[in-house]
Amino acid sequence: MSISPAGYILIPIGLILFSGSHKNLLWATVISIILWNSSVVYIDPITFYLRTPLFFMCLLIIRNIFDALVSGKFEANKGKANFLLVSFLIFAGLSLVMPLIINGGINTYPISQEFFPIHPKKPLYFKLINITQYAYLLFAVLCFFVFCAELKTKERIIKVVNLSILLGVIVAISGITYQILVLINFNSAALNFYSFLGAPALSFEGKLLFGKIPRMYSLVGEPGSTALFLLFSFGLASTPLFWDEIPSRSRKKNGLASSIILLGLLLSTSTTAYVGIVIFLISFNFIFMIKFKPVIYVKAIFRISLLGLVFFTMSFIVFKFLFDYPWCDFFMKSQVKKLMLEHGSGATRWHYIIENLNLFLKYPLLGVGIGGSRSTAMLPALLSNIGLFGTLSFLLFNWFIFKNVFETYLKSSRKDIFITGSLLITFLTIFSLRLFARSISGLLFCEYWLLMAIMYNVYLLYRKNIYENRC
């Protein structure tokens, strides 16, 4: 076991915060989410990196459990969302019997293999990795419960939303800085920095996609993961710009943050980023059209059209003059062909999806067991690894929270709808991408559970206020 250079700083900080107040440990945990591409401890025999967000999240979970034991007060919410999540865990746990039952009877792609190139299949047996994958799933669900426990007031929710926006700006700047270092042939600076952080995986070769376009790596990690976090922050930052009730000062701050994050998305060279922008625009239109009168809706559409125009203008300038590569060629040769399975990782991803769907058809109830098969998309991965019942529990959990926040949005006053509207648009963008563009390991990314906890608590706060007003 070895501690990273950053670990010698972060571990003492975490332990000091652990002994202090919940609030400071919560803020540190939220901030650490962007340090996914860093670790505090590396255990060599099992090739395990304790990533920085997981370290701080573990401290926050343990602190909540410890305080509950000391006080004797266990505030367990008996809502449907918690019931569905527990059901999800139960079915995932039951799926662990499947590798024992199959016992080498089929061949699958082990999740320990690299995504590309495609390696040969191997017989499926029960292994330690099945246990560790279930432990990760349990940890992810605990993240939701703890975030729900910590974000019970409107003031704290607004603070964590503003902090998430700021973190998006930092991630965008870190990614752009990496690209600049590659362009000026100063990769050693990036290498030294991420080595200090104990980065589990990062290519410092400065590979170019087209022309002078380097792939973006940030504090979060590779381009796809970076794009997902930027879209999370972008949804929270940009959506309030279209509500007149937002104070002018806040609108300017959000406008600046949105511009920096949008630039990061543009330069990410990630298909996830570009598809995410399209989903964001569609979600925005859907959410606005349902709530507002035509006059207000048209005004918002005009603003969102300006945003789209800014995006495409920025992209044209950047690719034409900075990267010296035609804008149309980049999107047609790299992004569109990738989505059409003609270029890049598109065909590889589709191969894994088909394989997982075939496994699901053979073992529909419990799948082949959590951790039994590699995938590049969460929905096929859930179906093939934990089966129909577990997948339905997870989807219903998301639907339940979305439905209730959507109903809250429809009933909210004009001064409050920017919160629920932002959350809904962000959720539709992030969840759609996670289902079809990320593997099941994407459930470990804490910003997803943070978003779900914020949405659930906003709904609970609204319901509580309605009840108190009636009384």
Image (cartoon, rainbow, N blue to C red):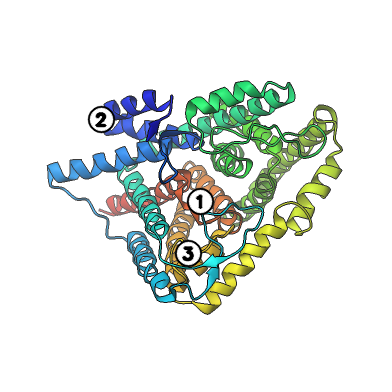
Quarter of the image with the N terminus is: top left
Q: Secondary structure at mark 2?
A: loop
- Count the marks: 3
Q: Inspect this view and state whether residue 154 appears.
A: no
Q: Secondary structure at mark 1?
A: helix
Q: Which residue is mark 2?
A: 21
Name which residue type carries label 1: Gly
Residue 303, by quadrant, is top right
Taking depth in this image into account, of 322 and 258 the one nearest to the observer is 322
Residue at 68 percent across and 32 percent down: it is 205
Q: Which residue is mark 1?
A: 442
Residue at 70 percent across and 53 percent down: it is 345
**Residue 179 at x, y = what percent?**
68, 28
Q: For the view shown, which residue lies furthest in the front direction? A: 45
Q: Which residue is mark 3?
A: 372
Spatial separation of the CA atoms under disc 1 and disc 3: 16 Å
Name which residue type carries label 2: Ser
Mark nearer the viewer, 3 or 2: 3
In the picture shown, does residue 92 fall above or below 144?
below
**Residue 295 at x, y = what percent?**
67, 48
Badge 3 vs badge 2, beta-carbon distance below 8 Å:
no
Q: Which mark is residue 428?
A: none
Question: What is the crowding at mark 2: few (fewer than 14 residues within 10 Å), some, or many (at least 20)?
Answer: few
Spatial separation of the CA atoms under disc 3 and disc 2: 40 Å
Mark nearer the viewer, 1 or 3: 3
**Residue 116 at x, y = what percent?**
65, 52
Name which residue type carries label 3: Gly
**Residue 464 at x, y = what percent?**
31, 51
First in residue order: circle 1 vs circle 2: 2
Residue at 73 percent across and 56 percent down: it is 339
Residue 83, by quadrant, is bottom left
Badge 1 vs badge 3, beta-carbon distance below 8 Å:
no
